[in-house]
Image (cartoon, coloured by chain):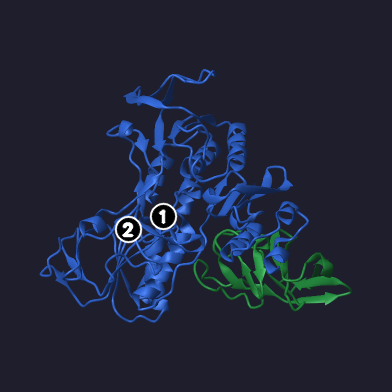
Chain colours: A blue, B green
Amino acid sequence: MASDKSASGPQGMVIVGAGECGIRAAMALREEGYGGPVTLIGAEPHLPYERPPLSKAVLLGDDAPSPKTIANEARLFEAAVLHLSSVTATGIDREAKSVSLSNGRGLHYSKLLLATGADPRPYALAEGLSHVFTLRTFDDALAIRSRLGPGCRLAIIGGGFIGLELAAAARTRRADVTVIEAAPRILGRAVPTEIAQVIHARHAREGVRILVGAAIADMKEQNGGILIKLQPALKDEAGPSAVQADLVVVGIGAQPNTALAEAAGLTVENGIAVDAHLRTSDPDIFAAGDCCSFPLAYQDGRRVRLEAWRNAQEQGTLAARNMLGGRQAHVAVPWFWSDQYDLGLQMAGLADRATQVVRRDLGSESFLLFHLDAEGRLVAASGIGPGTSIARDIRLAEMMIARGARPDPLKLANAESKLKALLAA
Amino acid sequence: MAGWIEACGADDVDEEDVIRFDHEGRTFAIYRSPDDEYFATDGLCTHEKIHLADGLVMDDIIECPKHNGRFNYKTGQAKGAPVCVNLKTYPVKVEGGQVFVQID
């Protein structure tokens, strides 16, 4: 724990975590006119950078990649944001309102924002093995990139977004790719079956071997790589009994970084629990982005946690305003995207409460799904198509979701019926 | 200074909407505002080179279809994170039911 003896300097705004959420909050504090000290604490050695390219562009190309920075040194200097790199927060003293740091120093805060993000879920069977990686940071991406290449045997554990985006990039680099998914289908948690099928088929066509319903029995280092032994398939089709890989990437989800909050006695409920204003159980401490669970305004305030780029941005900005005394509630509808090959998937809202799905066909490999609840309210929309072709419709659907609209299912199904007109109705 | 280039028919763009126009290896976005005026900008978002023509037009704003960066398409002004670089705009005229863009 920090002691107030070790903390120094005037009170100001302290942000723990220099990812998308933290840097947006820092810049928003300035945009809102705050003139006091702003300190941004980042565990990584890099300037704040964008994570979405890590599973895509960073893995491709011939040139040595550099992080896509969100704010370079000049911009941080101009905004008078003090960015401490390669430093972690080790404790919060809520009485003294101070944060202790891994460099032995401490910082007083008037308001504190926890934007600690989420880290890859560890996989017990892979613990301590060489050749096994996760993908969260720029350095992770570089390590994977340096080992990828023609003929490299890559095994990806987990058929989620990170794993599948990595699979697509690795095929472009002509690696030999196997995806091992324990569930009966890929993208089980987040994506409707029909869309998952399109993505699965596309990967198969691109030469990715996808093993679903595949339980791993054991992993061990062998022949300069990893031998992954699978449990005997319960189904009729005889899958392989083992996968030999030069490189293994584990992508089985992420878990919120709540240790700091928990040690400080803050309420944690599938993430650091915040109210609609992103305030934790301590009114001087806020949390935002992947690390927090918050009430979802458009669905009766039920508590959710999101791992999404736009959410991190929006919540970072909102937290900054409320740290300055604002009382603005978070009302945004969840939104995310994934790119694999030339296919773009987008989804707005959460579909888990839907009782009816309406499909609008747009072309081959391209359609929208509208998810309606028992009262006919649009609660989510998802779509897939080449590039960003479905983006505009998903955006319009998002606006309908936010309004609690109950659009006519027949019109939703008809590609001739413009969503903009339905939104205005 | 190059002359006026014929981009599309005036009816090819709906009101409060945008279409893509490619010319000599460059790509542009042609807009029709809710009050029935025409505008043109570079076709790619200044953040990550996404085609803006897939985005949504609301009043005088075009929103990037990937990361929701917003620009005023009449002035090219970037409206905040994640976009910080303005969009280049081009003069437009409508003659004989055709939209012309002056590309430099």
Are discs 2 and 1 located on one and the same chain? Answer: yes
Decide if residue A175 is on the left or right side of residue A46. Answer: right
Residue A42 to residue B31: above or below: above
Q: Is residue A232 visible?
A: yes
- Give whichever of B95, A52 is nearer the camera: A52
Q: How many marks?
A: 2
Quadrant of the image occupied by residue A82 = bottom left
Which residue is drawn at the image coordinates 48% and 37% (left, top)? Answer: A159
Q: Residue at x 39, y 38 (%)?
A: A250
Where's residue A425, x and y in %?
A: 71, 68
- Image position of A128 with respect to B61: above or below: above
Query: Which residue is label 1 attached to?
Result: A305
Give SS at disc 1: loop
Which secondary structure, mark 2?
strand
Q: Is residue A11 left or right of residue A414?
A: left
| Residue A374 drawn above or below residue A235 | below
* Amino acid type, label 2: Ile
Please, which residue is most extreme toward the right here? B96
The front one of B98 and A6 is A6
- Residue B7, image quadrant: bottom right
Q: Which of the two residues, A148 or A106, is positioned nearer the viewer here?
A: A106
Query: Which numbered disc flags the more N-terminal residue, 2 or 1?
Result: 2
**Three-letter amino acid code at the position of disc 1:** Arg
Q: Nearer the viewer, residue A378 or B99?
A: A378
Residue reaching furthest left?
A5
* Tag 2 subunit: A
- Density class for disc 2 (Cα within 10 Å; few <14, some 14-19, many ≥20) is many
Q: Chain of mark 1?
A: A
Residue A362, given in percent of the width and then of the height, sits at 72, 49
Q: Is residue A74 visible?
A: no
Residue labelled with disc 2:
A272
Give percent across and percent down for residue A108.
Answer: 20, 72
